[in-house]
Amino acid sequence: YEMSGEELWWRLSVQATGRMAVTLNKAKQKDLDTEHMMLFESQLEKLAEKQIYTIDHLATWEETKLAINYYMYAHGVKCIVIDYIQNIIGGSSNSEYETLNRIIRELQKTAVKNDVFICVFSQMNRQSIRDDEEEVFGFKGSGNLENAADIAMTLKTASSDKADKRRKLIVGKNRSGETGTIMLYTNYGYGYIDEMTQEQWDNYKIQSNTWKNRWKTTR
């Protein structure tokens, strides 16, 4: 829902080429030398052989549920990703709260009954975005999303500066393991995410900030 199927395939293909091999923009513009073009096309072929199905045109929960059941039973799909749950329309007679609660209950039943992994992305409310406590969640619309989940995580930016590539992955709930905060460095252009040590996090410098500030003062 949040990302088109075509965009998802572009990103998967870039990520599959390996670290720092092909950028997303260059791949889209076909601005690659022969070696990297061959690498990119070979990864596209390998991805096409895998059972990855993308659907970006569903509107209602009933349509989404039918698609989930079809791919589970017809193709043996064992991993389902919904991006994001607030985009699913439940019907004019139901409130957003009632709709989300119904969807959450049915997704939970589907996961248990069919032994499938279901990853659900959710919007966050504004207060939870500002709050940095590990155990605080604010999935928009319904607290039942956190209650139903075996693992609940939030991904937050390190600062308000858009040039800051650091992220915090906060695992606030984990029924089968540990909780805590994982510090990450993101490079979406090349399609990879790295874990950072505390020292790397503390010593990180936003390189483009210096250039921006210098440009503003000299123009």
Image: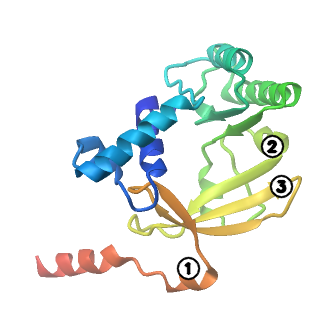
Query: In which quarter of the view is residue 28 placed?
Result: top left
Q: Which mark is residue 149?
A: 2
Q: CA distance from mark 2 to mark 1?
A: 29 Å
Against 122, is 114 above or below? above
Residue occupying image coordinates x 55% and y 82%: 200
SS category of the residue bearing label 3: strand
To which residue does mark 1 refer?
A: 201
Mark 1 closeness class: few <14, some 14–19, many ≥20 residues within 10 Å: some
Q: CA distance from mark 3 to mark 2?
A: 9 Å
Q: Which mark is residue 65?
A: none
Find residue 70 and report its horizontal and vertical position in percent: 68, 14
Find residue 36 and report its horizontal and vertical position in percent: 31, 51
Amino acid type at circle 2 is: Ala
Against 208, is 141 above or below? above
To which residue does mark 3 refer?
A: 174
Can I make out residue 25 in this image? no
Find residue 32 and report its horizontal and vertical position in percent: 24, 50
Q: Nearer the viewer, residue 14 or 37?
A: 37
